[in-house]
Amino acid sequence: MESELIGASKNMTRIRQLIDRVADTGLNTIVYGETGVGKEMVVQNLYLKSERNGKPFVKVNCAALPDTLLESEMFGYEPGAFTGADRRRRGKFEQASTGVLFLDEIGDMSLPLQSKLLHVLQGGDFTPLGSEKAMQTNAWVIAATNHDLEQDLTAGKFREDLYYRLSAIKIFIEPLRNRPEDIPLLINHYVEKFKAQFNNRELRVPSARTIQRLCAYKWPGNVRELQNVLKRIMILDDGEDGIEGLLSPGSAPADARDADGAKAAQAGSFLEVHGISDLSGLSLKKVRKEAMDRVEREVIAYVLNKTGWNRSKATKVLKISYKTLLYKIKDLGIEPPPDALL
Ligand SMILES: Nc1ncnc2c1ncn2[C@@H]1O[C@H](COP(=O)(O)OP(=O)(O)OP(=O)(O)O)[C@@H](O)[C@H]1O
Ligand SMILES: [Mg+2]
């Protein structure tokens, strides 16, 4: 398991310090940030640095299963608890009892399951499905999410009491675009890693110009996207200009923006662009969000360029409020061309 956290930004430095200080406390911790920023990696580091290292590390993906399955997965069941339950199954809380229980994508958990989880966190006890006996767990619960949970609290999608239970320690990972000094370090790290990994192939090491371009890019898919793009640059060897096809259009520099549609087509299918080649970590919800972001980024950047970055005009074309437009520009990392009058 690769676990070294690369990065010298203030955010990464602070996270490393936090990990060292929190690791042995066993305090419930929540790690949050956009997709691909390294949440799972931070959780692994917490585990590896703690005295629970070597004990079970048990992960539950709360977005991957329907409610009833997730419930039996977390709490286990007795034979006869439901049709098809022919023998006892230990739940993840039981398996993780002396170790770490990593609740990934906690923001996607339904409200009824949130209450059940809250109960466990309050008393440390839970009851497997079909059982009459409560069991104790001493698992260290670490959760991760790419939701803005405080917003979900206000919208009534996440229980406030559960949020406070889970977040004795909060670790926020900044999107890569807000810590640009980490980009060259990550590039360097992954170039060396891929060289070692693909040692029997001819690999193209990115030129200074390519690295400059990658450092200026906004990385909506964060470190995961950076890995995928680098891998393709090194393997495909399709020339310096080929790289624009690998980057999403809304985040391209001013001079490369015009051929919006053509660029998207050249980028290949969604699966290819996002480096999705196996089933692990795949979730339709996440794909939908990434696809929506990509489309919105492209359309909004297009309208802004057509209106000369007159945001009032752009809101009329897009039929959204001014506030929403400002939010989207920031959230999607859409950059004005250098000569725009703002
Ligand atoms: N600081 C870092 N140093 C080195 N590699 C990193 C760093 N941050 C992330 N990565 C790598 O980027 C990839 C994505 O990271 P990870 O799976 O931890 O992200 P995530 O935030 O959990 O994403 P998601 O929300 O999509 O689940 C992984 O391969 C991870 O090893
Ligand atoms: Mg993750």
Image (tube, rainbow, N blue to C red):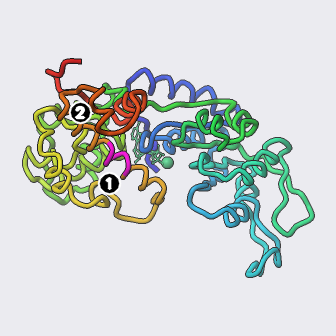
Of marks 1 and 2, which one's residue comes earlier in the chain?
Answer: 1
Examine the structure image and report whether residue 19 is included in the region drawn in magenta: no
Magenta-colored segment: predominant secondary structure = helix
Per the image, the residue denoted by label 1 is: 274
Please state the horizontal and vertical placement of residue 100, each as a whole percent of the image. Answer: 66, 47
Q: Is residue 215 above or below residue 266?
A: above
Q: Residues within 10 Å of mark 2 (few under 14, many from 20)?
A: many
Label 1 element class: loop
Q: Which residues are magenta?
A: 292-296
Residue at image x 38%, y 25%? Answer: 8
Q: Residue furthest right?
A: 132
Q: Quadrant of residue 182?
A: top left
Q: Is residue 319 left or right of residue 313?
A: right
Percent x, y of residue 91: 73, 62
Disc 2: which residue: 304
For the point 64% across and 42% down, the residue is 142
- Up-down relation of residue 325 to residue 110 (above or below): above
Image height of 106 relative to 178, above or below: below
Question: Which of these two is toward me, 50 or 217?
Answer: 217
166 and 155: which is toward the camera? 155
* Secondary-structure class at tag 2: helix
Considering every residue shown, the one lying at the far top of the view is: 342
- State the quadrant of the C terminus: top left
Q: Position of residue 283 (x, y in %)?
A: 48, 59
Left or right of residue 255, residue 82 in this image: right
**Residue type, numbered disc 1:** His
Identify the amino acid type marked 2. Leu
Q: Nearer the viewer, mark 1 or mark 2?
A: 2
Spatial CA distance of label 1 from label 2 is: 25 Å
